[in-house]
Image (tube, helix red, strand yellow):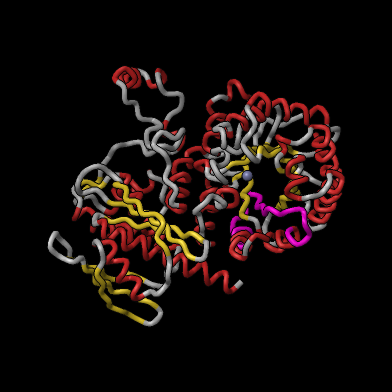
Amino acid sequence: MTTTDKVMIFDTTLRDGEQSAGIGLTTAEKLDIARQLDRLGVDIIEAGFAASSPGDFQAVRAIAAEVRRPIIASLARCVPGDIDAAWEALKDAERPRIHVFISSSDVHIMELLRKNPEEVMEQAVASVERAKGYCDDIEFSPMDATRTDLDYLYKLVESSIDAGATTVNIPDTVGYAVPKEFAERIRNIRQNVPNIGQAALSVHCHNDLGNAAPNSIAAVMEGARQVEGCINGLGERAGNASLEEVIMTIETRKDLLGVHTDIDTTQIYRTSRLVSDITGFPVQPNKAIVGANAFRHASGIHQDGVLKQRATFEIMEPQAVGWPSSALVLGKLSGRAGLRARLEELGFQLTPDQLNEAFDAFKDLADRKREVADADLEALMADQRRARSEPSIYNLDHVQVSCGSHEIPTATVVITGPDGSVTDAATGTGPVDAVYQAINRVIEVPNKLTEFRVDAVTEGIDAIGDVTIRIDRNGQSYVGRGSDTDIIVASAKAYMNALNRLLIMERAHADA
Ligand SMILES: [Zn+2]
């Protein structure tokens, strides 16, 4: 058995991650994430599950057409319609991959599929063969592999490789395995499947018990050479293996693992922030690698140590994962060149037009806020990205609120839409409610507000407020975000963002 020392990184943020409860992304947003994953250097992007919805199909097709370096994969069940849809969406890709999966554990086969193991085996082989008729690069996943009878698993893996699978993926679908046990399973597969050397061995671990990244690393130590996961550990339920954790473990413990990835680790921070911003899923402060406190040394002894010699308490440098290095703060008098330099350090490459736009917004912000920190710039860039990548149907031109202890909160909004500019006003239980009621009078789309969150981007009374909301309509959830030093304005922007996204996605569905 030979293995290379490169571990392929398979990102499924746009498929398994998007399946997370409460995430609904537009094609434009998925493209933004895919472009950043390309910069990060992932080997494979699973762009979606083409047969699952018209929106997924459209996104896979758009990413396949535009993002050329990485392999682009679409998931498919072992049924002809799914495989055909996957290919239909992938056929323009430079390097297409069809990823077929079928349940392999007894409990899944009997209770979910209501079949017998022989039928499942035949269906798997027929599906790999059908996919192979479309392209060479085929991945096969026996779902719930960690609860599957080993002898059956060997046969299933062997048959799928005989049928043409070039990658075999072992998913811990329910997050049940622990590292030692999972490593043994991988070793057993490598020792007992005669043709295993003809395919890449992959793992896909879920985090229900918090073992997703450790299980993935344990598998790498036993010869797995592809790891699947999501940025920020997104994914079904408790999520998938957090890719930044897997990547930095491989990078930081080269001495022990003896393998590498082709990831540009300095893009990790940017990727994490972009995914968090677009999905509306915040990163917990103590999250490994990308949490706000990941490189913060709070105790006196640790601070003293790090000042004397970083290696005393720091196993990796924050710059290695792209953390902005200096604490330089911009202010009112900072010029265009200073802003550009700072933005470039934060990982934003802007066209001259985008820089002009950013500079105007920066000046506007610096007028209201004495010091503009990196976090403010990121919020500002996120606002601009939303304005750019989400062609909005309605724009909020003006919002004005009057409220106070003896007043009925009243809001006036001016909104430009397909029928021109409309002014309307409404009252509410509070200022935000009044604004939302006024917007509802103009944009008549019944929905339910299910989440409303305000975060201060930096410390201080003049901080930018970052508002994240979720609205539900017809069983689908839509996130909206907006930021401003005025939280009422930020709330209005977030609601407009969610409504625009809802309308765009509903139209995409109606068109498809
Ligand atoms: Zn999964």
Q: Nearer the viewer, residue 120 or 370?
A: 120
**Can the viewer see residue 385?**
no
Res 220 quadrant in image: top right
Q: State the residue lying farthest toward the left.
A: 406
Vertical position of residue 94 compared to residue 194: above or below: below
Left or right of residue 431: residue 134 = right
Residue at the location (49% across, 54% down)?
22
Q: Please give left or right for residue 158 compared with residue 97 in the image.
A: right
Q: Nearer the viewer, residue 446 or 221?
A: 446
Residue 21 placed where, x, y %? 52, 51
* Quadrant of the rendered image containing residue 144: top right
Residue nearer the viewer, 367 or 472: 472
Instruction: Tell me which residue sits at (84%, 46%) in the image.
Output: 116
Q: Is residue 398 left or right of residue 229?
A: left
Q: Is residue 167 above or below residue 131?
A: above
Disc tally is: 0
Ligand 1 is in which quadrant of the figure?
top right
Residue 71 forms part of the magenta stretch = yes
Q: Which percent across, then down, holds residue 326?
A: 32, 36
Q: Residue at x 77, y 57 (%)?
A: 79
**Picture coordinates of residue 318, whole percent (x, y):** 41, 32
Query: Magenta includes 497?
Result: no
Residue stretch in magenta = 61-82
**In this rendering, is residue 174 above or below 512?**
above
Q: Is residue 14 left or right of residue 226?
A: left
The correct choice, above or below, for 232 with respect to 64 in the image is: above
Is residue 182 visible from the viewing direction of this image? yes
Quadrant containing the C terminus in the rendered view = bottom right
